[in-house]
Amino acid sequence: MLRLLATAAVVVTGVSAHGSHSENQEPLAGPHKSLWYNTLPGDGGTQADSVFSGISTFGRLPYHPCLASDDVKYDIAFIGAPFDTGTSYRPGARFGPNGIRQGSRKVRFSGGYNVPLDANPFDSWATVLDCGDIPVTSYDNAYAIHQIEEGHNSILMREPATNASAPGPSKKGKTLPRVITLGGDHTITLPLLRSMNRAYGPITVIHFDSHLDTWKPKVFGGSPSKQAAINHGTYFYHAAHEGLLKNDTNIHAGIRTTLSGLSDYENDGYVGFQIVEAREIDTIGTEGIIKKIRDRVGTTEPVYLSIDIDTLDPAFAPATGTPETGGWSTRELRTIVRGLKGINLVAADIVEVAPAYDTNAELTTMAAADTLYEVMTLMVMNGPLSEMVTKKEIEAKEDM
């Protein structure tokens, strides 16, 4: 009995001492930060966890639900448009935004420094966010297209984090943020251009694709209804007729599609495009293609960049809605995109990534993510859009 009492006394004393100790100790707020977050050498970037872990955002960027809240400012925003009910062959691009984010996990590996462009888009003047996806219905194409336009415009028309009060190139003379959209089939470019028109007026387009996408609705799809006339092969036709495109400054690159006839090329010219065919790379190389693009669009006016992943040969990007053999390699496309340095890219999209058709190695989603990494780097290197105004004024004086 005495032994039991002695044991109880020891336990009580221990509990009392522990309670007294805890009153004087500040509790730790979870694991020590330095165990999980490491400052990288060189440019001072920070990497959290491992590239294969965590919730996927583009390039492991900070996430903010921008359509639900406008209390965070940004200079470049990534936004998804999960729509694929305008495709003519293989659906599945509604899963493109998620797939591209998955494919981008390694983009920031070792800090994200872009060696060929000598810049790090993750460590710069720009505040860059992943804003999630635009809510898009899969039951009504007309309403979905309206959702995409309004969602994009809501992201586009806000004050940027940098130089918000400085004059910019928009119609109202304001500086706006840049927006990069993850598609989605190529139909989404029509509502995106409608949104851009509200901000900038008619705009120049650089279009990387294996297909023209300027077909008349009667030629592509037969146009059995008003809504069926708008699809991933006709959206530029509609954009031109709605006055969304600048005349004689737009260009396709990577074209290798079959045609209904040479009249398709005539119609393409009426819509306002110059054509660079994929096979031209065999004769003029990447430098020749870059020169054609730069000569066509110039470096002073706002430019919209639209990239269909089927620009790439299916050997490099099999997971797409309408694959065409004879395309460029991933290396060639990235080299050509880097050649757009200095062109005033105000917004961009990448489309037709359908992850269900990809390999287990995620070739297509990685190619899409890496291409956007180049685009993001170009935007950062160009500086805030307020600097476009100064650049344009300087070049105008030099031409006088």
Image: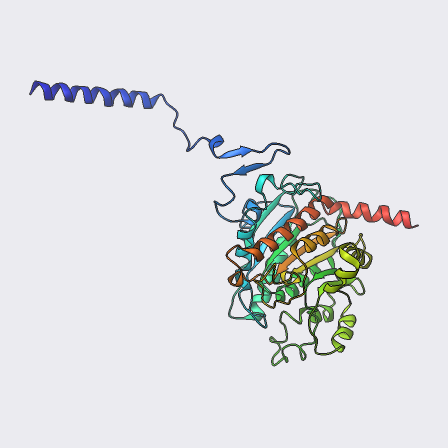
Picture layout, residue 341 above or below residue 231: above
Picture layout, residue 316 above or below residue 390: below
Residue at 71%, 71% in the rendered image? 214
Type of colouring: rainbow
Callout count: 0
Residue 381 lies left or right of residue 185; in this view the side is right
Q: Between 164 and 219, which is closer to the camera in this rendering?
A: 219
Residue at 64%, 67% in the rendered image? 324
Residue 69 horizontal/vertical position (percent): 54, 49
Residue 66 horizontal/vertical position (percent): 56, 51
Residue 10 horizontal/vertical position (percent): 19, 19
Residue 246 horizontal/vertical position (percent): 77, 63
Can you say which quadrant of the picture contains the N terminus? top left
Extreme front residue here? 282
Picture layout, residue 138 above or below residue 68: below
Extreme left residue here? 1
| Residue 70 visible within the image | no
| Residue 29 visible within the image | yes
Residue at 72%, 69% in the rendered image? 242
Q: Between 67 and 137, which is closer to the camera in this rendering?
A: 137
Residue 361 lies left or right of residue 268; in this view the side is left
| Quadrant in the picture for residue 119 | top right
Extreme right residue here? 400
Q: Between 250 and 69, which is closer to the camera in this rendering?
A: 250
Residue at 70%, 78% in the rendered image? 260
Q: Between 337 and 213, which is closer to the camera in this rendering?
A: 337
Residue 281 lies left or right of residue 21; in this view the side is right
